Amino acid sequence: MVLSTTALYRAYCRALIGVLWVHQKEIIAAPFPVAVVERLIHATARNPNPQYHYFDRHFPKFPSYLRRAAIMAALGQASSFSTRYDQWQGGIRKRRDALPPRRTGENALNPPLYRGQCIRFDEQYQHAEIKVWSGTDWIWTTLRIAAKRHRHEAPQNKALSPMLLADGSGVKLAIPFEVPVQFPSRKAAQRVCGVDLGIRKTATASIVSADGTVVARQFFHRGADIDRRDKGLVTVRSKARLTMGKSGTLSKGFCRAVYRKARHRNLDMAQRLSGEIVAFAQDHGAQVIVLEHLKQYRPRAGRKGSTLRQRFHGWLHSLLARRIRERAEESGLLVEFVNPAGTSEHAYDGSGAVKRDARNWSWVTFATGKRYNADLNACYNIAARFFAKMLGLTGRNAQACVRGKSSATQPRIPVTLSTLWRHAQAMATEHEAPTTAPA
């Protein structure tokens, strides 16, 4: 019955979309679009003869809450098509020869369940009563909740109306929760967690205080999962050689299952690692998680025959940053992004530029001869740049670049962890100086 309810809701939305194509202009211009659509499809005492009798005949006793939700969902799909078509006409296209978007009545919409009207829970969230379509009438049926998470256990969280997800794998309830979160002030932060997202190590994090003290540090890496993902992707090359032959072309959807598994492994790694990083920041009292702004960054591949290009394709920088931000905001932590230029190129102790190890790029050598881990050095500088910005230390003499594009003769000084050391030392000297003038 649950599957038939979802199929009935989708058929109702599909029929609504056809009505919206015809009356789109008058519906959008109306102050209350839902009321206009209801007058077209639903008979009432004040509206005994609607223009379209199809809905009351083929969808008898359709609940009013579901009807209005279906109208809003259909309006969203019609509005989305209009926006994409206007963009195509205006020349905003991915390719010059891109075809215009096409109208379609197919959808994969899921029915929302309004509390008290379409769904009722018990106090322990063990069972749920759902109003479903039996084939002849709308009835209440009780379903047992087999598994759930822990957001409902927090008394301050407010559960909103769930959505019924029914597919071939089973029936699920997607219940959104309103989580009240009070974020700390950026300028009042005393500890931050600097995170460097790398290729050899998935993530490296360190807890840094405002005076430049490194409180804790940790590597986050899931080597076994990465090996499984890369091992599956290696098979694509051998399968492509056997499939292409002399034509040199592959069919649409080639190795779809292999790529799907790789995406799912990346998603699982991002979810697990983001939880570990947020827990690490909370355990050490960090108020802010600092990441590099890598949205527009396009890495260069290695020499011919190397596996660096494949590693960049599996890099989790954007996915992991997005998951960290989602988890941190729910936990009451701020997430800030800093300029990534030069974080790995300069030593955290202020000794100057570093030199990468030719055999192992995970290590760098400082100008003083000291060898250090490259990812740890980078995450120190990432955390320092946040404090430098909050303390106003990012002026002309403390920039992220080695040398500016202007004609100035004096090179700019990069922001590193030593910048916080010098600032803390200057502040201590200022406080120790006498405040009264001699007589």
Image (spheres, rainbow, N blue to C red):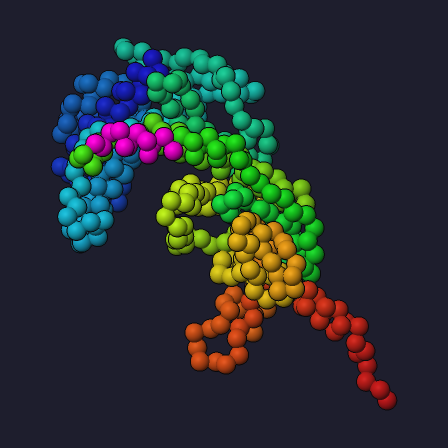
- Nearest to the observer: residue 59 or residue 83: 83
Is 345 positioned to the left or the right of 211 in the image? left
Numbered range of the magenta stretch:
233-245
- Nearest to the observer: residue 27 or residue 317: 317
Q: Which residue appears farthest toward the right when viewing the image?
A: 439
Quick check: can you spot residue 366?
Answer: yes
Coordinates of residue 301 in the picture (x, y in percent): 39, 50
Coordinates of residue 154 in the picture (x, y in percent): 59, 32
- Nearest to the observer: residue 116 or residue 107: 107
Q: Residue at x 56, y 71 (%)?
A: 413
Is 7 positioned to the left or the right of 418 in the image? left
Q: Residue at x 63, y 44 (%)?
A: 218
User: Compared to 365, does 127 lie above or below?
Assistant: above
Image quarter where the C terminus lies is: bottom right
Residue 291 falls within the magenta-colored stretch:
no
The picture quadrant where one finds residue 405 is bottom left
Coordinates of residue 352 in the picture (x, y in percent): 59, 66
The picture quadrant where one finds residue 406 is bottom left
Coordinates of residue 294 in the picture (x, y in percent): 44, 53
Residue 241 falls within the magenta-colored stretch:
yes
Image quarter where the N terminus lies is: top left
Q: Residue at x 49, y 45 (%)?
A: 199
